[in-house]
Amino acid sequence: MSSTFSGDETAPFFGFLGAAAALVFSYHQFSMDLLVFDTDLGMGAAYGTAKSGVGVASMGVMRPELVMKSIVPVVMAGVLGIYGLIIAVIISTGINPKAKSYYLFDGYAHLSSGLACGLAGLSAGMAIGIVGDAGVRANAQQPKLFVGMILILIFAEALALYGLIVGIILSSRAGQSRAD
């Protein structure tokens, strides 16, 4: 039986695993029209949202006028999911074994791309959650700490941005394994 498939038959498994890793580790679905946070999927954004949300709720009891100002860590945790979604889309559009040969090198490039972005999103989500929780509580007691908290959150968000950049670079290497 002849097959029209060209390349390595198991390679797409690794490519799709990379897309899944980017989503599972960093993705956070946010619906603006209902203001619903669905954190069943991504660990980084889910942890950051949950941990920061606990701090906002706790702080809101003491200083309810600061709740909207203190929602910044929750929003920043939600942004992490966009990075994972971008990489997952880039990876999934690059996997089409019927159109172009897809080799193990390509699958591994996509796997490493998804892992780089996803794990960076996970670590950034944990950092944002911890800093956000402590930061909003401290801000309730001392408002001068707000700018410092925002700067630390920006540095934590940069970790995920670095993962996105590395993921894009690694994903762009797919397709360069052999001259077709």
Image (tube, helix red, strand yellow):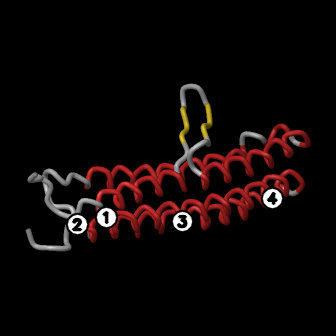
Residue placed under numbered mark 4 in the picture = 134
Q: Looking at the rendering, in which quadrant would you find the C terminus?
A: bottom left
Q: Are marks 2 and 1 in contact (CB under 8 Å)?
A: yes
Residue placed under numbered mark 3 in the picture = 120
Q: Circle 2 sits in a helix, a strand or a loop, which is it?
A: loop
Q: Nearer the viewer, mark 3 or mark 4?
A: 3
Q: Picture coordinates of residue 6 (x, y %)? A: 14, 59
Q: Picture coordinates of residue 179 (x, y %)? A: 10, 73
To which quarter of the image does residue 97 belong?
bottom left
Q: Picture coordinates of residue 118 (x, y %)? A: 50, 60
Q: Would residue 30 be found to the left or right of residue 1 on screen? A: right
| Mark pair 3, 1: CA separation | 20 Å
What's the residue at 58%, 47% (across, down)?
78
To which quarter of the image does residue 33 belong?
top right
What's the residue at 12%, 53% (across, down)?
3
Residue 103, numbered label: 2
Residue placed under numbered mark 1 in the picture = 107
Category of crowding for the residue at label 1, using alpha-carbon neighbours closer than 10 angstroms: few (below 14), some (14–19), many (at least 20)? many
Q: Nearer the viewer, mark 2 or mark 4?
A: 2
Q: Earlier in the sequence, mark 2 or mark 4?
A: 2
The residue sitting at the top extreme is 34
